[in-house]
Amino acid sequence: MDTVSFLIGSGFSKADGLPLVGEINERMRRINEDEIIIHSEGTAFFLNGQTNENEWSRKAERLFVQEFLKFYSNEVIDGEGNFHYEDFYDYYSEYLRTEDNEYIDEFCETFRNENDNEYNPIADNYNLVSQFHNTFNQLLSNFLQRAKYYENVSHLNYFKYDDFIGFLNHLIEKNQVKVHTLNHDLLFERVASVPPLWQEFSDGYEELGSPYYSEVNVNQTINKRYRVRLKYFQNRFDKKICLYKLHGSIDTYQFNIADQHRDLTRVKSDYGVEPRFVKEVQDETGRFSYIKGWQNNYPDFLSGTSTKVLSYGNEYYELLFKHFAENLKKSKLLIVIGYGFGDSGINDYLKKYFLDRGGKMVVIIPKKPDTELINYPNTVILEKKMEQVSLQEYMSLLN
């Protein structure tokens, strides 16, 4: 069978109300301490009408989020209008790698002097920024999360994507479809769960045989917790529609990042599932037991304009990018939807493994992007939003 590849950016998800990069920047550039909550175990999220019943709990950490963002906008980039969350991620991540930034150190010292007291001791500079990193990533994930993406769907009830779904359904009659996304959200998984696509869909994760478990709380007539088995990454893409989340996902965690029983297997959470996982193991006598994993509170996804490129070579993302390269090399057509060509690492892959080889690329985006990649002779621009493209127009791309 022939191969048709897709590359999906944030514009693909915009039709269903998920934010574009500019909207993420708008939300994340200014966060007031009274609009977020940080629980005692470190989990954080935006308040959405809820009341923080213990507003003094982890008050200093919430204040640091508020003031650190102000410091960055006012002292580093000269105004909130220049804020880009991935550039900001690069800025403070460099400090976490090197502990070498006199301006961050000075800010942290000032913050500590103004807010420290005997009842509320504040961490050292490195741990202040590390705690911020933990909270900021959870808030970003929370902003991209939608409960409906965990629901089951039936045919014809996702009309904004019906033409796209119809195109996929046609493609898999004679083609392998390789979908590469830079988005962290779960929209494509929902689209692919529409019959009959779900039977032909693989994202490299499997539940059968998984030794990884967590608990879900069911509160109906009684309050009861059940242990459920979780999907884990097996690097098996054996269906007609394969999804590769090149920058990670908001539902994926590393099982255990601690030194003891270290296990960096990626495990998928689910709706209502606690992100505190256990692994079933068997000793030499044949007896089974569970060992606890230690996960970050935030899911495993890449951010930062340059920082994420540093992760392309780690054991998990290296596998995904190897698939990306091989899929591009064997594709007869690449369809790019909602990607503005702002990622230099991704662009290098497109040039090296597809465009320089004479591949045909179709770009679907409302405004023509400013990039040399659209100047290749076999590149076509369709200046439309994804939801404006009809099934007939999709079909014509195959000619």
Image: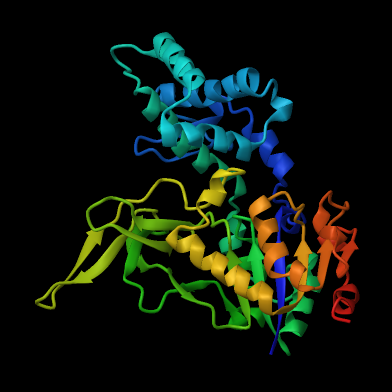
For the point 61% across and 40% down, the residue is 86
* 248 relative to 181 in the view: left or right: left
Question: Height in image: 95 above or below 20?
Answer: above
Percent across and percent down for residue 197 are 66, 80
Quarter-of-image position of residue 375: bottom right
Q: Say whether residue 283 is visible.
A: yes
Please identify the quadrant where the C terminus is shown.
bottom right
Q: Say whether residue 152 is visible.
A: no
For the point 78% across and 67% down, the residue is 159
Percent across and percent down for residue 201 are 59, 78
Q: Nearer the viewer, residue 18 or 331?
A: 331
For the point 52% across and 52% down, the residue is 301
Please identify the quadrant where the N terminus is shown.
bottom right
* 175 relative to 318 in the view: left or right: right
Number of disc labels: 0
Quarter-of-image position of residue 56: top left
Q: Nearer the viewer, residue 230 or 21?
A: 21
Q: Nearer the viewer, residue 271 or 287?
A: 287
Percent across and percent down for residue 178 are 65, 74
